[in-house]
Structure formats: C-alpha cells, structure tokens
Amino acid sequence: ENTVILSPSLLSSDFSRLGEELAMLEDAGVEWVHWDVMDGQFVPNITFGSPVIKACRKQSKLFFDVHLMIDNPGRYIKEFADAGADLICVHAESETHLERTVAEIANHGVRPAVAINPHTSLSAVQYLLPQLYMVLVMSVNPGFGGQSFIPFSIDKIRTLARMIKMHEADTLIQVDGGVTPANIAELHHAGADVFVSGSAFFGEPPYDKRLETFMEAACA
Ligand code: DX5
Ligand code: ZN
C-alpha cells in the first residue's frame, strides 16, 4: 500500500480565523483536515463541538476527519453527521457498545473509524476491522497538541498492519500525536497511511511548503 494522506489538526490553528485557515489549507493542496473535539471529561481539555464544524462545512470542500474525544460518543453521531463530517472517529475506551456506534456512523453515510489510546490493546478493534474505514493509533495521550511521540506506537502500527492484512480488510491506519517530518518515514514504513499533524504543521508556514516537506519526508 502506498497511501500517504496528511490531515492537519486544527487544534494548532488560529481558532479566531477558522474559515481563513480552511481556505489556506485548501489552496495549499491539503485534502483532509482533522477536527479534535474534546469534552473536558474523556480528556482534560475542551475545544469545540458540532456547531463550529457545521458553520465551517459551508465554506470548505476539504475531507472533514472528525476525532471525537468525548464520553459516550454514541449520543452524538447524528449531530456530527448532520454537521457535515466525512469521517467520524470514536474512542474504543469511551464507548461500551462500540459495534453499534460504528454501525450507526456507517448508517448515516459517514466513514467509521475507531481510535485507541497508547495503552489500549489492538484486540479492541480486531473484530471490527471489516466494518472500519480507518483505525487511529494514538501516539500520545489525547488532550493536547505539542506532546512528544510515544515510541512503542511504531510497533503497534506494524502489528495492526499485519492484522489488517490477515483479515483481508482494507482499513486505513492513522497515527496522531507527535508526528513530524523526522518520524513520518518510519511510521509510513511501519504501515501508517494517514498522518495527523498539529504543532509541527501549523508551526511552520507557508502551508504549501509544509505539506511538501511532510509528503517528501514520508516517501524518503
Ligand atoms: C491530541 C490530538 C491531536 C493533536 C496532535 O489529543 O488528538 O490531533 O492535535 O497535535 P501534535 O501534532 O502537535 O502532537
Ligand atoms: Zn486528533
């Protein structure tokens, strides 16, 4: 597989100019954008909810990759689907009835994904792989941007890639947390397809140059 998709995390963008940020990303040639929804319960931090995503949906053609870091996300699938999410990712740790929530995402015509925290075993997603468009391997403890990459995540990605192949699924692997041009090649070789970057992407404009740097580094 040779998929390389960069999904810049708006968590590190300027929240007072979200519309302009989205337009600049689109002009730079970015295809996906990552929305970090946090509720102050599942993670310590609070960011934004579906009304903000809905307002921005009207101004952007980007693929909206929505990462829900909230308790019992099953309660809010319809809301985020109606807001215009292209993909909804829920945490295995936050949902008791994960299979049902994944099915509900798909029933709304949205691509379903499951995220797992660094300590969570891959067995949490094993039986759902045929239903999943993507698995998100968290490489930091979620809640904040700018944290450093947890090295054992590489091994986890490698094992997950093998597991996906064994199940003959075509599930994408996303990695989120501490991704930089310095580690993206190793992550890609391990089997990751979609790379989230917050601080390392937004910290060094212009965005077109930054996208190029990440893409070239991934394939090096
Ligand atoms: C962490 C979020 C990430 C975050 C990544 O809780 O899920 O998407 O924005 O930020 P960096 O790339 O700075 O680690
Ligand atoms: Zn995220």
Image: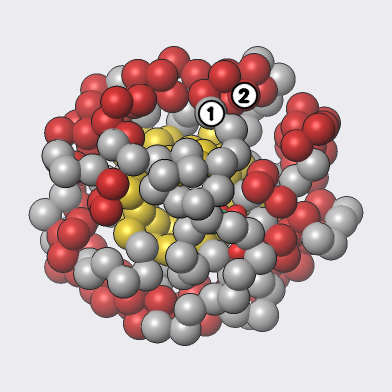
Contact check, label 2 and label 1, Cβ < 8 Å: yes
Q: Is residue 215 visible?
A: no
| Residue occupying the point 66% across, 80% down | 182
Residue 206 position in % (x across, y down): 88, 54
Crowding at dot 2, Cα within 10 Å, few <14 / some 14-19 / many 20+, comes out as few
Callout 2 secondary element: helix
Q: Is residue 131 left or right of residue 172?
A: left
Who is closer to the viewer here, 70 or 113?
70
Percent coordinates x, y for residue 213 in the rendering: 75, 67
Report the amino acid beneath label 1.
Answer: Gly
Q: Is residue 148 left or right of residue 187?
A: right
Q: Pick the residue in front: 7 or 144.
A: 144
Determine the image quadrant of residue 90: top left
Where 73 sits versus 218, above or below?
above
Give the residue at x 28% y 47%: 94
Q: Quadrant of residue 116?
A: bottom left
Quadrant of the frame with the C terminus:
bottom right
Mark number, residue 49: 1
Vertically, is 77 above or below 94?
A: above
Residue position for label 2: 52
> Residues under labels 2 and 1: Cα distance?
6 Å
